[in-house]
Every structure is written in structure tokens, then in C-alpha cells.
Amino acid sequence: MKITVISANEKLLLDIARVLRERSMADQVDAVAGPLDKLQAMDAAHAPSLLVLAQPVLSSGELERLESLAIRHPGMAILLLCQLQTPEFLLQAMRAGVREVLPLPADPAQLHSAVRRIEDKLNVHKRAQGKVLAFVSCKGGSGATFLAANLGYALAAAENKRVALFDLNLQFGDASLFISDQKPVASLAQLSQQIHRLDASFLASSMVQVTPNFGVLAAPEDPAQANDVHPEHIDVLLKLARQHYDFILLDVGRSLDAISVRALDQADMIFPILQATLPYIRDGKRLLNVFRSLDYRKDKIHLIVNRYANSGEIRLRDCEQAYGTTMFRTIPNHYEAAAASVNQGVPILQLQRNSPVSKALQEMARELAGESAAEARGWLSRILQRA
């Protein structure tokens, strides 16, 4: 972990840096002598994982500068060592983005414990990075939200993966309603307003928990709140989510703006969703042209034909000829089951496990999760295999 210690008291600075270096040889501990102003010009590339500020007393102006640092570097945790320990001051410090406040003089055992707690929250010892899958509608009504929500459920329930679904349709998103009747406790906009205190527990508590390992972060209920979400918030959110989830699904909607493009930039796989009709094919080609202008690799784009019927006038080979590429997957048309799932707010795999839509989603989840996950699949997979 990269740790920066700053203090105007040089002896205090050296003592704390020494204690931190004794904690772990793997940590990079840098000592900065002087006031907090020395860090104001620090850019994101040089920001540490943990900032330790040792100062007996902090003025209101210094707390404001500390808060400014926390906002500009939301991935950086702040630990404060200070003599002042009144409830009022502790509350002010927490509002400024400080994770923990310890008394001075610093007790080595307390300091080590605090750093270890912060290290656990930051998940410094990272597991394999989660994959980001973005679902984009080629045209309104394509079923992108339905597929994203229900694939998330299939990955969680049938493949035993940790899954997060972020509703990035900021104006009129309703992804959580497709698979749950719970009222969202928070939205992406509300989380963005407090981005400086974002960690794994805050993210999890902001989401609708569909299953213990599948959560949905809802879009703002008021479209005006979409202005509270900025592209840099997407960076912070996805960086954290990759560390704690196997799959992060993004319901991007149809509009391409600074928020959605930032999300698509970071996606490992992009799934444009279309149907086998001429308007969808035309708009899908327009969307692919936009992706080419953004320099997205061809192997990043995976076309999915939703509500596909073999008896339709436009066949799969017609779609592939129009796009000059093979379709990644087709999802069969079973309107009655899909409509019942949406109307009841229940995942289609839970409501009608024999539906061809359910089986197609399970196959897609299995392919994405990889064959190595076969032994770890949950109860739903075993039921569906016997069906």
C-alpha cells in the first residue's frame, strides 16, 4: 500500500513514518514535512492509497483543505492523528472525509490496527479484477434493461458470482423494478454526492439487494438529479466495483453522453441489443459507426438479437450480412414469460425456469463465467439442469 505521512512537526513525522514502515515491508511510506498546503497540487497519479496527517490541532480552514483533497482524490483514505477528540470535532473530521481519528501521541498498536482496517476496506490485496459488461439499446424498446437485469440474476444465482448492476440510464432508468419490488434506499446520484466517502460497504448499502450476491444501484428518481453524476464519479465507482464484484453490468440506455461514453470506455465487453427489424438494424449500424469513431476494438463489441424468431421475415443471416459480423447470441422470443417477469418484478429464471429465454440467459451466463465455475454453481443451475 502507498502511504503518505504529512506533518509540520518533523520529529512527529519521522516517528510515525518509522512505525508505519515497521508494520509491513511491502508498504511504500513517504514522509512530507510541512503544512497540508504542500499536497494541494498533488495529481491523481501521485495520490497515495492512504494519507496520514499528524497535527495536534486543526483549524476550520485546514479541515476545508482536507475535504478538498478528499473530493479531488476519492480513492484516497485519510487517517488523522490529533490531540483534539471532542465529539463535535470528530463529526467535522468525518464530514471532511476522514476515515479514522486517533489521539496523539500515537500508540503504535492503535495505528497499526487503524491502517489494517483501512487496508481491508480499500481491498489493497486485490483479487482478480471483475469484468464490466455494458448493455446498450440500438433503439428504444430493445429489451436491454431486461437482459442486463436478468443476466445479472443468472450470473449470481446460477453461477454463484458476485454481481453488481448499475443503472446508468440517468433520466428514466428503472432497472431495479425488473427484478425486485424493493424501493431503492439510494441512487447513483445520491452516491455521487458523497463520492469522497465511497467504499465497499457504502456501495453495498446503497444498492437494492436482489440476492445476497447481486445488488442493483438505481438511477435517480428525479431526472434533474442526473446533473449530480459526473464522468469522474464513474471512474471511481467502476474502479471500486472491479475489486469487489466478479461482474459489473451497466444498463447504459440509448443516449450517448459524457457519462455513458466514460462507462463504455471502461467496459470489457459492450452488448448492443437489437431486434430483427429494419429500424433496429439501421440504428444498430449507426451505433457501431459511433463505436468505430471512439476507436473501440471490434472484439469488444458483441451484438445480441433479442426476441428472435426463426419464422421472422428477417433471418439471422440477414442481420449478419447487414453488419458484416456474426451475432454473439440470440435470445428467443417468449413475450408472455418476459412480460410476466417485468410486471411482477421477478427474475424470469425464478418465475419460469423452462422458458427458452431463461435457458438462453443461463447459457450466456455459463459462457461468461467460464467452465471453471461449473462446480461452484448455485441451486438454480442444478434445478435448471434437471428441468
Image (cartoon, helix red, strand yellow):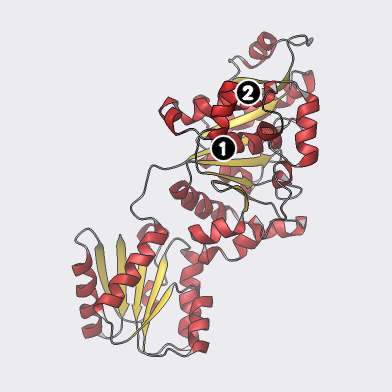
Q: Position of residue 77 (x, y in %)?
A: 41, 67
Q: Which residue is mark 1?
A: 157
Depth check: give the residue in front, 184 or 50. Answer: 184
Determine which quarter of the picture holds residue 333. Answer: top right
Q: Residues within 10 Å of mark 1 (few under 14, many from 20)?
A: many
187 over 163 or under it: above or below: below
349 over 241 or under it: above or below: above
* Label placed on residue 199: none
- 231 sits left or right of 43 in the view: right
Q: Which residue sits at x=50%, y=77%?
A: 94
Determine which quarter of the picture holds residue 23. Answer: bottom left
Determine which quarter of the picture holds residue 155. Answer: top right
Tag 1: amino acid: Ala
Q: Is residue 318 visible?
A: yes
Q: Which residue is mark 2?
A: 359
- 173 sits left or right of 57 in the view: right
Contact between marks 1 and 2 (CB within 8 A): the answer is no
Answer with mark 1 or mark 2, whichever residue precedes in sequence.
1
Whole-number angstrom distance, CA of label 1 to CA of label 2: 13 Å
Depth check: give the residue in front, 364 or 188. Answer: 364
Q: Position of residue 35 (x, y in %)?
A: 35, 82
Q: Secondary structure at mark 1?
A: helix
